[in-house]
Image: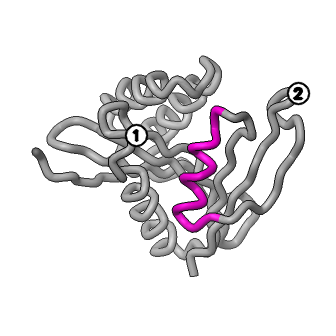
Amino acid sequence: MNVLTFRQQIQPSDIEAIAAMVESSGFFSEEEVAIAIELAEDKLEKQEISSYHFLFAERGNQIVGYSCYGLIPATQSSYDLYWIVISNEMRRMGLGKIIMAETEKLIAQSGGRQLYAETSSRNQYEPTQKFYETCGYHKEAFIKDFYAPGDGKTIYSKSLK
């Protein structure tokens, strides 16, 4: 078994890997998959001036998970977690918690003090909600019917102080 390594620098081949991981989860619509790709393409094109940051987890030469995050505009030290996705073969093995901890560490090293994550309130997303809670996130807000009728937005936060 190969050792898990991390990198932040995005590569052109990452676009395809991101699309495959997000699509394979079964959670996201075509529009959401397109958004995940759009954020990666923005980072690839703009590099350091992009407001999106990535952390890739790899085993050997294969991406097995990633996170995408960024400083929330007009805030001093609050960050949004845009994506945290694990490949199908690595789900339920603790990799999500490892990537989350590494992401939080990078944000804290950059001066970030608060990290926010949002998710759907649909039953399908109960494992996601439990994941955030087991990572030490607290439910901050709920917005009814945000994504669609019957599909609210739940916002979680964690202090990184």
Q: In the figure, is residue 79 to the left or right of 141?
A: left
State the image coordinates of residue 61 (x, y, percent, origin top left).
17, 37
Q: Is residue 62 above or below residue 114?
A: above
* Badge number at residue 149: 2
State the image coordinates of residue 113 (x, y, percent, origin top left).
61, 75
Q: Residue at x 12, y 46 (%)?
A: 2
Secondary element at image label 1: strand
The amino acid on which the numbered mark 1 sits, given as a three-letter code, is Ile
Give the residues drawn in magenta, as a range.
124-137
- The answer to whether marks 2 and 1 mark residues whose Cβ atoms lie closer than 8 Å is no
Q: Is residue 63 above or below residue 149?
A: below
Q: Residue at x 50, y 67 (%)?
A: 107
State the image coordinates of residue 15 (x, y, percent, origin top left).
40, 28
Residue 139 or residue 127, whichever sits in front: 127
Residue 49 or residue 5, whichever sits in front: 5
Name which quarter of the figure residue 156 lies in. bottom right
Q: In the figure, is residue 145 to the left or right of 89?
A: right
Residue at label 1?
86
The amino acid on which the numbered mark 2 sits, given as a three-letter code, is Pro
Q: Residue at x 64, y 38 (%)?
A: 125
**Which is nearer the N-term, disc 2 or disc 1?**
1
Q: CA distance from mark 2 to mark 1?
A: 28 Å
